[in-house]
Structure formats: C-alpha cells, structure tokens
Image (cartoon, rainbow, N blue to C red):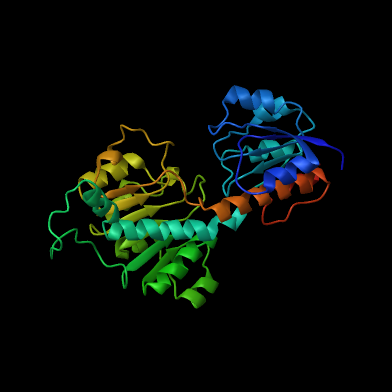
Amino acid sequence: MGRKKVYVTRKFPGDGMSTLSRHCDVLLNKKSDPPSRNEILRNIAGKHGVVCMLSDRMDKEVMEAAGAQLKVISSYSTGFEHIDVKEATARGIYVTLTSDILAEATADLTFSLLLACARNLVEGDRMVRAGRWNVGWKPDLLLGTDVHGATLGIIGLGRIGSAVAKRARGFGMNILYNNRNRNLQSEHELGAKYADLDQLLSQSDFVSIHVSLNEETREIIDMSALQKMKRTAFLINTSRGQVVNERDLIVALKNKLVAGAGLDVFQKEPLSKTSPLTKMQNVVLLPHIGSASIQTRSRMGDAAVRNLLEVLEGKKPDGRFLVNPEVAEFR
C-alpha cells in the first residue's frame, strides 16, 4: 500500500497513532480541544481517510471538502449519529466505529453511578473535605438506599446493558429489561425478565439507559416516563444525553417525582455552568467518561486505526465495526 494521507482530529491513548504513522502520512490535531468546523474543512482536504471523534460532525460539506479520494471515516466511538451515513454510502465511503470495545468499562461506570446515587457517596466526600463531619458516627447520617435485592430496569439490553446486568446479578438485584427484541440469552444466563417500558419504569428502583440514539429513542425519558417511575427511584444515563428530556428531568428532580439521577451524558456537552443540575444535591454529574479507562481507550484507538487501514488496503472491515456494509454496492 502506498502512503495515504490521513487526518486525525485528536490524539488518543495507546499505540494506534504510531501504527498509523508507519503506514500513512498523518495530519494530527495536537490540541486537546476539538477542532473548529473551519479546521476540519481545511484539514480534511485531499485526505484518503479520517479518524474522527463523536464531537466532529461529518456531513456532506465535510465530505465534499475532502474530495473524491476520501475512502473511510473511522470514528473513535461506539455511536455514529455525528456522521451522515447515507451521504457517505452514496459516495462510496466506508463508515466504521469502535463497536462494543467499551462495553465493560461503560458498565463499570454505570454501576459506579448507581452506587454513588444510592449511598450518597459524593455528598459524603464533600462533607469530609469541607470539614462538616462533626460527629464520628450517627445513626441517621447520609442514609441511602440498598442496592442489593433492589430491582434494576435496563432500557436497552445490548452489550453494555448485558454487562450492567451481570454486575447487577452479583448484587442479587432483580433485573427487568426493555429492548427492541427479546434477549433470550440474557434471560437464560442472567435471569433478566422482559417488561414493557411502562412496567419497567413503574417497578424499578433504578432505571439505567443503554440505547443508541435514533428517532425512536430521542427523549424516550420525558415527563410522562418520569411520572411513571417510583418517587424513590433513581435514573442512570450513560448512553446519550438526547435520550432524556433534560428540562423534564430537572422539573422531576425539583418536585421529587424521582429520588435522584446519575448522569454521564447531557443534551448539550459540556453541561452549562448555569444548568440547574449543577445546584442539585440529588444528582451525580460526570463529564462523559463512560469508557475512560487507559486500557479501553487504547483498544478503541487500535480498533479505529485497524478499521481505517483495512479500508485503505482494499479490505472490508470486520462486520462488528462496519456501519454501512451496503457501501460495497456503491463502490
């Protein structure tokens, strides 16, 4: 394979960058901040491939700026809503992602949020640091709620949702799930029970969301859904911010329609400093770090590079990582 030109919108952990540099001429955005729209349009010109992030919009304008030689958009992400897949397919451009590599790390973080909400971990940390811990032990200090034996409702029982269910099983939780299709394997292996969405919302002590973002799932959690939840229940979201109507959630939290929430994603990121969520004591807020372990982010980088190189070498990427297999017909 001759030296191809590749644009990488941000540096990522692991050995993937050095591998890519051995095979291609790489233009790398070395800043920690995402590139501006104008930077993307300028830097993608004449490139055969691009490694992009979830925050980089890859639409018709970007593809036109790249030129006819663009063969692959390799996204360092498990989602692809930032890419105009239909436009890419029509132009014969492969779209790839890092698929389920981040499932276990995201499940770890999901359960961390669940535990933090249930047991007031963040508030306890604040209390100790602020010097507000005045009595060594009190029978009513920061009373939380039990996780073991509680009911966990999982919306979206794919790889991440199933990984969360495995952790829940270790805590002796009852597992309900709602999915587009029944997951008979998880029902058999994990004892998960299928429920319609209303039933799941009304019976769960914790509701954890693990769906991809599409028109069916956009704002699937709105005021109507929140009103169906127990007042003692917690909402956990590590999927996409847009699956929750944030305004409705704020109202529900203020009016104690639900006990609290653990959020790693938001409708607009970064979350505004003026958001009412930042003032609430019954929420745990994280800066979109679901997959943020050294090992996982490194494996994501390796996969993104491998996907890109396979296309540039004339090979078809692994089906797990290929978003638009129909592109072969257009090519």
- Seen at 80% across and 32% down, the residue is 69
Question: In the rendered view, would you say 171 is above or below 302?
Answer: below
Residue 178 in sight:
yes
Res 265 quadrant in image: top left
The x and y percentages for residue 330 are: 79, 41
- Seen at 44% across and 72% down, the residue is 192
Q: Is 300 displayed left or right of 243 in the figure? A: right
- Seen at 51% across and 58% down, the residue is 105
Q: Is 116 displayed left or right of 326 in the figure? A: left
- Seen at 72% across and 50% down, the residue is 306
Which quarter shows the N terminus? top right
Q: Is 56 displayed left or right of 330 in the figure? A: left
Q: Is 305 displayed left or right of 314 in the figure? A: left
Question: In the rendered view, would you say 24 is above or below 191?
Answer: above
317, 137: nearer the viewer: 137
The x and y percentages for residue 316 are: 78, 51
The x and y percentages for residue 319 are: 71, 56
Residue 95 in sight:
no
The x and y percentages for residue 179 are: 48, 61
153, 4: nearer the viewer: 4
Question: In the rendered view, would you say 269 is above or below 124?
Answer: above
